[in-house]
Image (spheres, coloured by chain):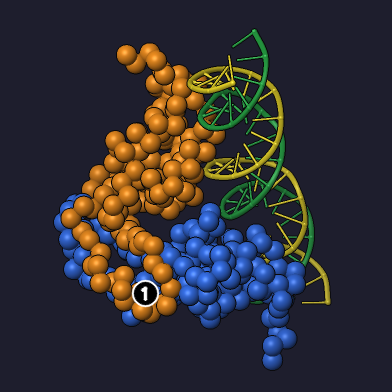
Chain colours: A orange, B blue, C green, D yellow
DNA sequence: TTATAAATAAGAAACGTTCTCGTTTAGAAA
DNA sequence: TTTCTAAACGAGAACGTTTCTTATTTATAA
Protein backbone atom coordinates (compact mmCIF):
# COMPACT_ATOMS: atom_id res chain seq x y z
CA UNK A 1 0.00 0.00 0.00
CA UNK A 2 2.92 2.37 -0.43
CA UNK A 3 1.80 3.47 -3.88
CA UNK A 4 -0.87 5.86 -2.73
CA UNK A 5 1.28 8.87 -1.88
CA UNK A 6 4.65 7.72 -3.13
CA UNK A 7 5.68 10.88 -4.89
CA UNK A 8 4.13 13.29 -2.48
CA UNK A 9 4.81 14.62 0.96
CA UNK A 10 8.54 14.66 0.91
CA UNK A 11 8.01 16.84 3.92
CA UNK A 12 7.24 13.83 6.07
CA UNK A 13 10.24 11.99 4.73
CA UNK A 14 12.49 14.82 5.87
CA UNK A 15 11.15 14.72 9.41
CA UNK A 16 11.22 10.94 9.53
CA UNK A 17 14.80 10.81 8.40
CA UNK A 18 15.89 13.34 11.01
CA UNK A 19 14.16 11.33 13.68
CA UNK A 20 15.65 8.06 12.53
CA UNK A 21 19.30 9.06 12.41
CA UNK A 22 21.80 10.17 15.01
CA UNK A 23 24.21 11.71 12.50
CA UNK A 24 22.91 15.27 12.97
CA UNK A 25 22.87 15.94 9.24
CA UNK A 26 23.11 19.19 7.35
CA UNK A 27 20.51 20.19 4.79
CA UNK A 28 22.67 18.77 2.03
CA UNK A 29 23.15 15.48 3.87
CA UNK A 30 19.38 15.18 4.20
CA UNK A 31 19.02 16.00 0.53
CA UNK A 32 21.56 13.40 -0.55
CA UNK A 33 19.95 10.74 1.61
CA UNK A 34 16.42 11.39 0.40
CA UNK A 35 17.46 11.49 -3.24
CA UNK A 36 17.75 7.71 -3.05
CA UNK A 37 14.04 7.34 -2.40
CA UNK A 38 12.90 10.57 -4.06
CA UNK A 39 15.21 11.18 -7.02
CA UNK A 40 13.44 14.42 -7.94
CA UNK A 41 13.62 16.06 -4.54
CA UNK A 42 15.12 19.52 -4.55
CA UNK A 43 17.44 21.17 -2.09
CA UNK A 44 14.98 24.02 -1.71
CA UNK A 45 12.37 21.63 -0.39
CA UNK A 46 14.80 20.38 2.21
CA UNK A 47 15.73 23.88 3.37
CA UNK A 48 12.12 25.06 3.39
CA UNK A 49 10.88 22.16 5.46
CA UNK A 50 13.83 22.15 7.84
CA UNK A 51 13.10 25.81 8.55
CA UNK A 52 9.43 25.04 9.10
CA UNK A 53 10.08 22.13 11.45
CA UNK A 54 12.62 24.18 13.36
CA UNK A 55 10.13 27.02 13.69
CA UNK A 56 7.53 24.59 15.00
CA UNK A 57 10.00 23.09 17.44
CA UNK A 58 9.84 19.60 15.93
CA UNK A 59 13.54 19.59 15.21
CA UNK A 60 16.38 21.74 16.42
CA UNK A 61 19.55 23.26 15.10
CA UNK A 62 22.89 22.45 16.66
CA UNK A 63 24.52 25.50 15.16
CA UNK A 64 27.06 25.33 12.40
CA UNK A 65 30.10 23.13 11.86
CA UNK A 66 32.51 24.83 9.46
CA UNK A 67 29.83 27.17 8.26
CA UNK A 68 27.17 24.51 7.67
CA UNK A 69 24.10 24.21 9.88
CA UNK A 70 23.45 20.82 11.46
CA UNK A 71 20.07 19.52 12.60
CA UNK A 72 18.79 17.14 15.22
CA UNK A 73 15.43 15.38 15.25
CA UNK A 74 15.79 14.68 18.95
CA UNK A 75 14.51 17.74 20.77
CA UNK A 76 15.09 16.34 24.24
CA UNK A 77 17.96 18.15 25.96
CA UNK A 78 21.21 16.31 25.43
CA UNK A 79 24.88 17.01 24.97
CA UNK A 80 26.91 16.87 21.74
CA UNK A 81 30.44 16.13 20.69
CA UNK A 82 31.79 17.67 17.50
CA UNK A 83 34.91 16.20 15.89
CA UNK A 84 36.95 18.87 14.16
CA UNK A 85 38.61 16.22 12.00
CA UNK A 86 35.72 14.47 10.26
CA UNK A 87 33.01 16.99 11.27
CA UNK A 88 30.91 14.22 12.79
CA UNK A 89 28.48 15.23 15.50
CA UNK A 90 27.54 12.60 18.08
CA UNK A 91 25.35 12.44 21.14
CA UNK A 92 26.55 12.12 24.70
CA UNK A 93 23.38 10.75 26.26
CA UNK A 94 24.88 10.09 29.66
CA UNK A 95 26.05 13.65 30.22
CA UNK A 96 23.49 16.18 31.40
CA UNK A 97 23.38 19.86 32.18
CA UNK A 98 22.28 20.27 35.80
CA UNK A 99 18.68 21.45 35.91
CA UNK A 100 19.32 24.11 38.54
CA UNK A 101 21.58 25.98 36.13
CA UNK A 102 18.49 27.21 34.31
CA UNK A 103 17.27 28.88 37.46
CA UNK A 104 20.67 30.40 38.16
CA UNK A 105 20.89 31.76 34.64
CA UNK A 106 17.37 33.12 34.79
CA UNK A 107 18.25 34.86 38.01
CA UNK A 108 21.49 36.29 36.62
CA UNK A 109 20.08 37.55 33.36
CA UNK A 110 16.60 38.53 34.40
CA UNK A 111 15.47 37.01 31.13
CA UNK A 112 13.71 33.87 30.01
CA UNK A 113 15.66 30.73 29.10
CA UNK A 114 14.26 28.60 26.31
CA UNK A 115 17.02 26.05 26.04
CA UNK A 116 20.69 25.45 26.50
CA UNK A 117 23.32 23.76 24.43
CA UNK A 118 26.41 22.04 25.75
CA UNK A 119 28.86 21.03 23.06
CA UNK A 120 32.26 19.45 23.45
CA UNK A 121 34.71 20.02 20.63
CA UNK A 122 37.70 17.84 19.91
CA UNK A 123 38.81 14.85 17.85
CA UNK A 124 37.14 11.48 17.76
CA UNK A 125 39.27 8.40 18.24
CA UNK A 126 39.40 7.63 14.52
CA UNK A 127 40.72 11.10 13.79
CA UNK A 128 43.36 11.14 16.50
CA UNK A 129 45.71 8.81 14.62
CA UNK A 130 45.86 10.32 11.16
CA UNK A 131 45.21 13.95 10.39
CA UNK A 132 41.71 13.07 9.18
CA UNK A 133 40.70 9.51 9.11
CA UNK B 1 53.04 60.03 20.57
CA UNK B 2 50.13 58.42 18.77
CA UNK B 3 51.17 59.76 15.39
CA UNK B 4 53.96 57.24 14.81
CA UNK B 5 51.91 54.27 13.58
CA UNK B 6 48.46 55.83 13.30
CA UNK B 7 47.53 54.43 9.92
CA UNK B 8 49.19 51.07 10.31
CA UNK B 9 48.61 47.91 12.21
CA UNK B 10 44.88 47.81 12.19
CA UNK B 11 45.52 44.25 13.20
CA UNK B 12 46.29 45.35 16.75
CA UNK B 13 43.20 47.51 16.86
CA UNK B 14 41.05 44.49 15.99
CA UNK B 15 42.49 42.41 18.81
CA UNK B 16 42.36 45.29 21.27
CA UNK B 17 38.74 45.97 20.48
CA UNK B 18 37.77 42.33 20.95
CA UNK B 19 39.56 42.30 24.29
CA UNK B 20 37.98 45.54 25.43
CA UNK B 21 34.35 44.70 24.76
CA UNK B 22 31.95 42.13 26.13
CA UNK B 23 29.50 42.42 23.24
CA UNK B 24 30.90 39.40 21.37
CA UNK B 25 30.83 41.18 18.04
CA UNK B 26 30.57 39.80 14.53
CA UNK B 27 33.13 40.70 11.87
CA UNK B 28 30.87 43.43 10.62
CA UNK B 29 30.38 44.86 14.10
CA UNK B 30 34.17 45.02 14.51
CA UNK B 31 34.41 46.66 11.10
CA UNK B 32 31.80 49.29 11.91
CA UNK B 33 33.42 50.10 15.23
CA UNK B 34 36.94 50.44 13.84
CA UNK B 35 35.79 52.60 10.93
CA UNK B 36 35.42 55.44 13.42
CA UNK B 37 39.15 55.45 14.12
CA UNK B 38 40.31 53.98 10.79
CA UNK B 39 37.93 55.23 8.11
CA UNK B 40 39.74 53.34 5.37
CA UNK B 41 39.70 49.92 7.03
CA UNK B 42 38.28 47.15 4.88
CA UNK B 43 36.04 44.27 5.79
CA UNK B 44 38.58 41.88 4.31
CA UNK B 45 41.17 43.02 6.83
CA UNK B 46 38.77 42.34 9.66
CA UNK B 47 37.94 38.84 8.42
CA UNK B 48 41.58 38.03 7.66
CA UNK B 49 42.79 39.07 11.09
CA UNK B 50 39.91 37.47 12.97
CA UNK B 51 40.76 34.19 11.24
CA UNK B 52 44.42 34.57 12.12
CA UNK B 53 43.76 35.37 15.77
CA UNK B 54 41.32 32.49 16.01
CA UNK B 55 43.89 30.15 14.48
CA UNK B 56 46.48 31.32 17.01
CA UNK B 57 44.04 30.88 19.87
CA UNK B 58 44.09 34.56 20.86
CA UNK B 59 40.36 34.89 20.33
CA UNK B 60 37.58 32.36 19.96
CA UNK B 61 34.42 31.89 18.01
CA UNK B 62 31.09 31.46 19.78
CA UNK B 63 29.51 29.95 16.69
CA UNK B 64 26.84 31.75 14.75
CA UNK B 65 23.78 33.73 15.74
CA UNK B 66 21.31 33.85 12.86
CA UNK B 67 23.97 32.80 10.42
CA UNK B 68 26.59 35.32 11.55
CA UNK B 69 29.73 34.27 13.39
CA UNK B 70 30.39 35.96 16.74
CA UNK B 71 33.78 36.36 18.39
CA UNK B 72 35.09 36.64 21.91
CA UNK B 73 38.40 38.11 23.01
CA UNK B 74 38.14 36.30 26.33
CA UNK B 75 39.51 32.80 25.78
CA UNK B 76 39.01 31.67 29.37
CA UNK B 77 36.21 29.10 29.58
CA UNK B 78 32.91 30.77 30.38
CA UNK B 79 29.23 30.44 29.64
CA UNK B 80 27.13 32.58 27.29
CA UNK B 81 23.58 33.74 27.00
CA UNK B 82 22.15 34.51 23.55
CA UNK B 83 19.00 36.62 23.27
CA UNK B 84 16.92 35.56 20.28
CA UNK B 85 15.20 38.96 20.29
CA UNK B 86 18.05 41.45 19.96
CA UNK B 87 20.77 38.89 19.13
CA UNK B 88 22.92 40.15 22.00
CA UNK B 89 25.40 37.71 23.47
CA UNK B 90 26.40 38.18 27.10
CA UNK B 91 28.66 36.41 29.55
CA UNK B 92 27.53 34.37 32.54
CA UNK B 93 30.73 34.52 34.57
CA UNK B 94 29.28 32.85 37.64
CA UNK B 95 28.15 29.70 35.84
CA UNK B 96 30.74 27.03 35.14
CA UNK B 97 30.86 23.67 33.40
CA UNK B 98 31.97 21.06 35.95
CA UNK B 99 35.57 20.07 35.26
CA UNK B 100 34.94 16.36 35.63
CA UNK B 101 32.64 16.43 32.61
CA UNK B 102 35.71 16.62 30.37
CA UNK B 103 36.96 13.34 31.76
CA UNK B 104 33.54 11.71 31.42
CA UNK B 105 33.26 12.87 27.83
CA UNK B 106 36.77 11.71 27.02
CA UNK B 107 35.93 8.32 28.46
CA UNK B 108 32.64 8.08 26.54
CA UNK B 109 33.99 9.17 23.18
CA UNK B 110 37.49 7.74 23.36
CA UNK B 111 38.57 10.98 21.70
CA UNK B 112 40.35 14.13 22.76
CA UNK B 113 38.44 17.15 24.06
CA UNK B 114 39.81 20.56 23.14
CA UNK B 115 37.10 22.73 24.60
CA UNK B 116 33.43 22.90 25.43
CA UNK B 117 30.79 25.52 24.98
CA UNK B 118 27.74 25.99 27.13
CA UNK B 119 25.23 28.44 25.73
CA UNK B 120 21.84 29.39 27.10
CA UNK B 121 19.33 30.68 24.58
CA UNK B 122 16.30 32.79 25.43
CA UNK B 123 15.16 36.37 25.68
CA UNK B 124 16.81 39.11 27.71
CA UNK B 125 14.67 41.16 30.05
CA UNK B 126 14.44 44.08 27.61
CA UNK B 127 13.11 41.78 24.89
CA UNK B 128 10.54 40.01 27.05
CA UNK B 129 8.12 42.94 27.05
CA UNK B 130 7.86 43.85 23.37
CA UNK B 131 8.52 41.52 20.52
CA UNK B 132 11.95 43.06 20.09
CA UNK B 133 13.02 45.96 22.20
C1' DT C 1 -14.30 19.10 -15.47
C1' DT C 2 -13.05 23.17 -13.07
C1' DA C 3 -11.31 25.70 -9.19
C1' DT C 4 -8.39 26.33 -5.29
C1' DA C 5 -4.72 25.96 -2.13
C1' DA C 6 -0.62 23.63 -0.57
C1' DA C 7 3.82 21.43 -1.88
C1' DT C 8 7.26 21.29 -4.90
C1' DA C 9 11.41 21.85 -8.60
C1' DA C 10 14.40 24.76 -10.71
C1' DG C 11 17.17 28.23 -10.65
C1' DA C 12 18.03 33.10 -9.52
C1' DA C 13 19.27 36.02 -5.82
C1' DA C 14 21.08 37.30 -1.41
C1' DC C 15 24.14 36.92 2.18
C1' DG C 16 28.29 36.06 4.84
C1' DT C 17 32.82 34.82 4.14
C1' DT C 18 37.15 33.86 1.64
C1' DC C 19 40.31 34.63 -2.01
C1' DT C 20 43.05 37.25 -5.50
C1' DC C 21 45.77 40.78 -6.83
C1' DG C 22 47.79 45.08 -7.03
C1' DT C 23 49.23 48.75 -3.72
C1' DT C 24 51.02 50.58 0.48
C1' DT C 25 53.83 50.47 4.42
C1' DA C 26 57.76 49.48 7.55
C1' DG C 27 62.10 48.26 8.13
C1' DA C 28 66.58 46.63 6.39
C1' DA C 29 70.38 47.06 3.28
C1' DA C 30 73.21 49.55 0.39
C1' DT D 1 68.56 58.82 0.22
C1' DT D 2 67.49 55.05 -2.68
C1' DT D 3 66.47 50.33 -3.25
C1' DC D 4 64.77 45.97 -1.81
C1' DT D 5 61.82 42.69 0.62
C1' DA D 6 58.13 40.97 3.19
C1' DA D 7 54.02 41.86 5.66
C1' DA D 8 49.57 44.34 5.80
C1' DC D 9 46.19 46.14 3.43
C1' DG D 10 41.92 47.82 0.15
C1' DA D 11 39.04 46.75 -3.41
C1' DG D 12 36.36 43.84 -5.38
C1' DA D 13 35.73 39.21 -7.47
C1' DA D 14 34.62 34.57 -6.24
C1' DC D 15 32.75 31.07 -3.44
C1' DG D 16 29.47 28.21 -0.75
C1' DT D 17 25.38 28.16 1.92
C1' DT D 18 20.85 29.58 2.40
C1' DT D 19 16.66 32.02 0.95
C1' DC D 20 13.51 33.69 -2.41
C1' DT D 21 10.76 33.75 -6.77
C1' DT D 22 8.08 31.71 -10.14
C1' DA D 23 5.86 28.31 -12.58
C1' DT D 24 4.36 23.57 -12.11
C1' DT D 25 2.37 19.64 -9.88
C1' DT D 26 -0.62 17.44 -6.69
C1' DA D 27 -4.60 16.75 -3.70
C1' DT D 28 -9.02 17.93 -2.64
C1' DA D 29 -13.43 19.97 -3.23
C1' DA D 30 -17.08 21.97 -5.96
The one of D2 and D26 positioned closer to us in this rendering: D26
Within 10 angstroms of label 1, few (less than 14), some, or many (20 or more) residues?
A: some
Give the residue displayed 31% in from the left and 38% down from the top: A19
Residue toward you, B46 or A91: A91
- Residue B107 percent across, percent down from the top left: 16, 56
* Label tally: 1
User: Does any portion of residue B52 appear in the rendered image?
Assistant: no
Can I make out residue A41 in this image? yes
Residue occupying the point 39% across, 67% down: A113
Outermost residue on the bottom side: it is: B1
Q: Quadrant of residue B34?
A: bottom right
Q: Taking B93 as reference, is B126 left or right?
A: right
Judge from the rendering whether residue B7 lies leftward or rightward of residue A115; answer left or right.
right
- Which residue bears the numbered disc 1? A106
x%, y% of residue D13?
73, 44
In terms of depth relative to the viewer, which is nearer, A94 or A48? Answer: A48
Percent coordinates x, y for residue A88 in the rendering: 33, 45
Quadrant placement of the C terminus of chain A: top left
What subunit carries mark 1?
A
Q: Residue at x 29, y 56 (%)?
A: A77
Of A61 and A113, the residue lying toward us? A113
**Which quarter of the rendered picture does the N terminus of chain A lie within?**
top left
Does residue B118 appear left or right of residue C13 in this picture?
left
Amino acid sequence: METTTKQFRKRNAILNYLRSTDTHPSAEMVYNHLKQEYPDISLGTVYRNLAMFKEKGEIMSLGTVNGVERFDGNTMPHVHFVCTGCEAVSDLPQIAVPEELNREVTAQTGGKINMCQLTFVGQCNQCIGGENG
